[in-house]
Image: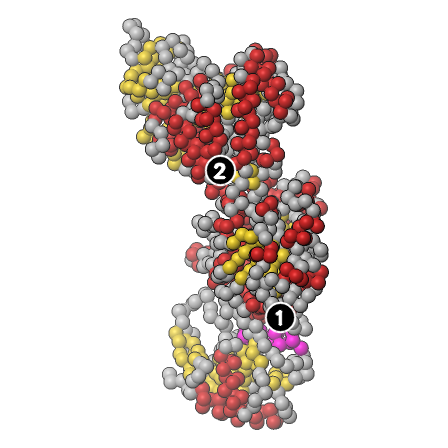
Amino acid sequence: MTLPNPADLIRQMALDLRARLQARGIEAPRFIGIRTGGVWVTQALLEELGITTAFGTLDVSFYRDDFSQNGLHPQVRPSDLPFEIEGQHLVLVDDVLMSGRTIRAALNELFDYGRPASVTLVSLVDLNAAELPIRPDIAGVTLSLSPNERVKLIGPSPLSLEQQVVEPASSLQESPR
Amino acid sequence: MIPTDAKRPLQLNDQGQLRHFLSLDGLPRSLLTEILDTADSFLEVGARAVKKVPLLRGKTVCNVFFENSTRTRTTFELAAQRLSADVITLNVSTSSTSKGETLFDTLRNLEAMAADMFVVRHADSGAAHYIAEHVSPDVAVINGGDGRHAHPTQGMLDMLTIRRHKGGFENLSVAIVGDILHSRVARSNMIALKTLGCPDIRVIGPKTLLPVGVEQYGVKVYTDLTEGLKDVDVVIMLRLQRERMQGGLLPSEGEFYRLFGLTTQRLALARPDAIVMHPGPINRGVEIESAVADGAQSVILNQVTYGIAVRMAVLSMAMSGQAAQRQIEQENVQ
Amino acid sequence: MSLSIIGARLIDPASGLDQLSDLHVENGKVLAIGAAPAGFKASREVAAQGLVAAPGLVDLNVALREPGYSRKGTIASETRAAAAGGVTSLCCPPLTRPVLDTSAVAELILDRARDAGHCKVFPIGALSKGLEGEQLAELVALRDAGCVAFGNGLNSFANTRTLCRALEYAATFDLTVIFNSQDRDLAAGGLAHEGPTASFLGLAGIPETAETVALARDLLLVEQSGVRAHFSQLTTARGAEMIAQAQARGLPVTADVALYQLILTDEALTGFSSLYHVQPPLRTRADRDGLRDAVKAGVIQAISSHHQPHERDAKQAPFGATEPGISSVELLLPLALTLVEEGLLDLPTLLARLTSGPANALRLAAGELMAGGAADLVLFDPTASTVAGEQWHSRGTNSPFMGHCLPGAVRYTVVDGRISHEA
């Protein structure tokens, strides 16, 4: 299948997001990108929206639910949230939403920082394969893949989407999406 | 030539990840760097309002201290709690072994409590190795200090301190001063600095406090503090224990201070931006002048903070390595 | 019971014999070497083609652990283990409980050894009461009860003058004193040789001078008192040099070394295995090489096992909390043959160090094969091999060589014409 160009998706996402925030009366939300792909999407999105305030980066390694099976991710980096979470409206951005577990971990981590006023979930790609009741508020594109297919965001510049095939019944999973 | 344990990588699983943390000897540079990087992330956690992460939730960490220590014990407790683990602390020095129970039996009883990890401190060199060899292989063993042999978490927190305050190790000059002979901290530090590529490692002390063959660590030996401190970037002061006077190793604390104590004057011989470190607890007026310990160049209190982060990193990595090993073994069975 | 051993290579270091020859035994004595006497028909014939026949090994240092340490071993079990190692005569040290400082203890040991019948036992008596180094033990009574020499183990004498008096007393009666020279203060608290390995492992060190300082003093006291002296369990090259110099000066001192000191070095301690925890400690390669040279030259004329069996618990702890000692007599011959395999010694010289050498050092009626003499011998296959531990008689399994494949295999050990071990 031919995959869409992220730049095109982000343009539309920016419009949809602006509309949604306006409808809900959310004025100056802070943006948080989930490492690593979510950070690239956040950067591109903010550029498109013309927002220059600092955004946060979230590393969810310490909140994942698969530590007992897969252990610690070797590329742990510190999270960086240069603003208060307490009472803040947030826009949480990720690149590919699959099982929903990463978002679950991200929410748990955010709530350890403080109690946000709201969290709007934005994802570049929604694979419609959620294993938890988590749905994006804004999605760039919804795709349906077969069980051994994956989609990966390549970046930081230019951004592009790439399709990959994984070994069937692989027990050492990559990061659950 | 440092004798290595290379033929028995007891500490590593089949993928070269940590499954126990017993000594820094034989660990590759990449692994030490991974520990430091992971510790950096945990430092960030420590700066948040909620200092806990759920990483080790449901796991039981057992601190088994055969040798008394408040500071190391509390930092390990704190580290495990911040990882959301359940923590038990046993001060065995005061209980069962004094009733004649062997170390072997104490361990068997602890294993029956289904701990996932033991953090052990013991007065005998090699105790951590012995314990790792005799408990179930599923239980991670972390060395909190064994005799004179090793104190690997202290070594790593000292390295984190140096990295955070000096950037890297490649162009550094580091001096370790005091009772090297009896110091497991010194041994771990020398190995870590060498592995991480520090080109100028110096040990400074009287002959009575320098181990025979200390050159094998790749260090330069000085018996004159003023010579040894010239232009160093890092000064690590070691604690001098009262007992050393009895053994005939030193005439008095006074003479030691006069010759090897870190005073403001002596510190001036080092680089102006040199940092001063000490594993603690400090003996003011014995190995270090109060003004230096409390001064601008001292990072002694920072070391304590870094210690919690490093221990969180080591606990996580060892637990992770154990999980990975179980995974590998399950796959081998299939 | 009579025996004919047919077609073995007979090596008797004492007489220099080394040839294919038959040997005939009757009534516990060697009847003839070579052709059988006319009309002699042995009740048992051993086909010994391809085997080597030698005097039964004489081991100067085998702890039997009885009386007093039955968890570690008994006279029956340890003499049986010795027989498996090719030993027909052994000396047991006075470190029993109670200490071997009364004739009653000596008699008990000799009785039990006789009852077990695996090996001839020549007890070493305590030089001082309780091995405490303060009061002289009753040396003559002990001699009369069967003690062949006297020593104080690694325990020091309280003061040098007392030691000197003890030596003079022993010299009065032409008794041999065995020295385990080690300076108590220099060795105090030490677990391993003071060198780079111990420093790296964080183990308290015993410096070379612990041995050499004591040796220097002991050699001079020997010279002054004129006592017959045997220096046991040397561990340093320097120490071996000092013995050589004393011998060159005309001092009639003899020496032995533990077999494992000729094989292992302190590098074995990496990994903290308590199986390598011994006292006096394993030392450096240079020391091992110096000891090997001294053995080759005959300065050290005896190799002993320094057998110290232990119960499991004694080694089940971190290094510093374990008891020192290796269970070694059972592998004496195979392990010694590794020295021949490595080209260090030829077989006849090795056998001399294990038979006539030790026997001469303590003036024991052992260690040689001659017509009319006691039929104490060992028959072994130099081309076979022994897997250490496959068959094991000692109570102590504390040997770092367990599972190793060692050269040679003891086929028969014969004591007073009786087969004490057969494989």
**Which x, y percent locates residue B44?**
61, 71
Q: Quadrant of the C terminus of chain C?
A: top left
**Which x, y percent locates residue A50?**
54, 92
* Horizontal side, residue B144 vs residue B334: left or right: right
In the image, which disc is placed on residue B45?
1
In the rendered structure, which segment of residues is drawn in magenta?
Answer: A100-114
**Which x, y percent locates residue B98?**
69, 42
Residue B102 is drawn in which quadrant?
top right
Q: Quadrant of the N terminus of chain C?
A: top left
- Total residue callouts: 2
The residue marked by circle 1 belongs to what chain? B
Estimate the spatial distance between the alpha carbons at disc 2 and disc 1, rounded to whole Å: 50 Å
Q: Which residue is mark 2?
A: C283
Does the segment drawn in magenta span residue C346?
no
Residue at horizontal 54 percent and vertical 71 percent from the top:
A77
Residue at horizontal 49 percent and vertical 82 percent from the top:
A40
Tell me the crowding category of disc 2: few under 14, some 14 to 19, or many 20 or more residues within 10 angstroms, Cα based. many
In the image, which disc is placed on residue A24?
none
| Colour mapping used in the image | secondary structure
Vertical arrangement, residue A87 with respect to residue A20, above or below: above
Q: Secondary structure at mark 2?
A: loop
Tell me the crowding category of disc 1: few under 14, some 14 to 19, or many 20 or more residues within 10 angstroms, Cα based. many
Q: Nearer the viewer, residue C408 or B212?
A: B212
Q: Is residue A124 visible?
A: yes
Residue at horizontal 56 percent and vertical 78 percent from the top:
A57
Residue at horizontal 54 percent and vertical 56 percent from the top:
B202
